[in-house]
Amino acid sequence: MASDLIRVTGMNSGLDTESIISAYTSTAREKVKDAKNSKTINEWTQDAWKSLNSKIYGLYSGTLSTNRLAAAYSKTKVTTSNSALTVVAGQKAVNGIQTAKIAGLAKAAYLTGAAIGVSDSTANLNSTLGIAEGQQITLNKQNGESRTIQIGGAEAEGVTVVKTMDELTKALGDSGLNASFDSTNQRLFLSAKATGSSNDFNLSGDTDALAALGLATKSQLDAAGIDQDAASKIDGSSAKIILNGAEFVSDTNTFNINGTTYTVNFMPTDPEEEISITTGTDYDAIYDVVKDMLKEYNSVMNEMSKLYNADPSKGYEPLTEEQKESMSDSEIEVWENKIKDALLRSDDTVYDVMMTMVNTAGGSFEVGGKKMFLSDFGISTLGYYDAEENERYALHIDGDADDSNTASKDDKLRSMIATDPEAAASFFSQFSQTLYTNLYSKMGSTKMSSIYKVYNDKQMKEEHTDWEKKITELESKLSDMEDNYYKKFSAMETALAKMSSNQNAVSSLLGGN
């Protein structure tokens, strides 16, 4: 607590008042420093736990939550005899061979206008193209929607009046087409915004106006007896496949049939070709599920081992602001990391969670009437002397090409999955479920911890609040103590000043006689 007292130093006594009072209050000052250090350590420890808890909870709520279900190991692989068709199996897919024939591709409708001899998109269409004012064209869409556009003339109900090419392309665009005018080639380009016959369109209305705009097709020009180049129109079409003898149609090149996705990429060279679709168990995908789970397990386990076995930080304590002023940022970081790295050293809670995971990994699970262990799948630790420091609880897969420690061993896991995928699914779903349950038992809400926290976060927050209060109290006591000493020294200085004044007065009198 700051003091309002004017603190006078030893002007008359010649004493170093500041140093003397600092010595008198050193014990109280040290208590303030210790309390602040404890508060800082509390904050850093909370941060360390938040980081570790996030990783533990991530394993629990993500990988384990998914892998405890049998569906996580229901992996299907689909291959086709022609890349013109790709297939992604759904949950209902069954193993076997199907046949498919691609009968058509989904295409968007396009209309490329004829050259019209006008390059200025802002020019008046009536005067530059000779279109009579008030002539109309109508955009007709396959879904039944239509829009009438009038070229100049008076406003009319139910129509959009345009005067320039820019206004025309905007009106067509607002009607659900892609519309643009190429002033260099002097052509209008129109297209549907989606593939499929249901998104097709055509233009009708005054043929003279369509012809002047270059939008009349050959049949329209022939019917009107107009001799000029015609617009080129490609009708929108839907994709069509014949799957196991049944016909399916889609406005896109993707079909969702009984939960499985079929995508047409291009037309085969031979349109009559029957494409084979082979569906089977994806052993590699199941292997990856197990491998990825163990990789995350090891990441969490190794992090806990590193924190638990960290070197002690004896002799290190949080730096004061004065100490930081004489150090570089990198020196401060190294110093503080020395403390932070050791915050969870030999922590009982860390050890408890580690042993929970270790004991689960070492347990057995009944599959097909017999007990099986991770080792039956070629999964184990390396052993105390073969493993790197802080990796002695990590699990390794024999034959894992990405693991230099076990890559040369027989790939038992992959073999077990290929031989009996159901047994592998049963074992690893039980393993995941058990570890999921055991970790949850460490994350239940208590008076000292919140739900999904393996550490006493409530207790640590209360301790932090207590330290803040303690610091305030100690600083107040220190300030009061300093004020008291300054008052005493100030009184002494005042007394010495009066004594000196009296002596000077006496001396003056004596000198005057």
Image: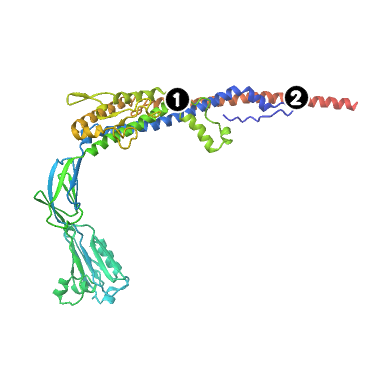
Q: Viewed as shown, does residue 503 lie left or right of 98?
A: right
The amino acid type, in three-letter code, at marker 2 is: Leu
* Depicted 121 relative to depicted 395: above or below: below
> Could you tell whether 166 is left or right of 415 in the image?
right
Q: Name the residue: 56% across, 34% down.
A: 324
Circle 2 — which element?
helix
Answer whether residue 156 is visible to the viewer in this image: no
Looking at this view, is 247 or 509 the one in front?
Answer: 247
- At label 1, which amino acid type do we have? Glu
Q: Position of residue 4 (x, y in %)?
A: 61, 31
The answer, for residue 219, to whether it is visible in the render is yes
Q: Secondary structure at mark 1?
A: helix
Question: What residue sits 48% from the left and 32% below the top?
Answer: 337
User: Residue, x 19% and y 46% (percent of image)?
Assistant: 79
If you read the primary sequence from the N terminus, does the residue marked by circle 1 or circle 2 appear first? 1
For the image, the number of numbered tags is 2
223 over 470 or under it: above or below: below
Residue designated by label 1:
463
Which of the 4 image quadrants contains residue 271? bottom left
The residue tagged 2 is: 496
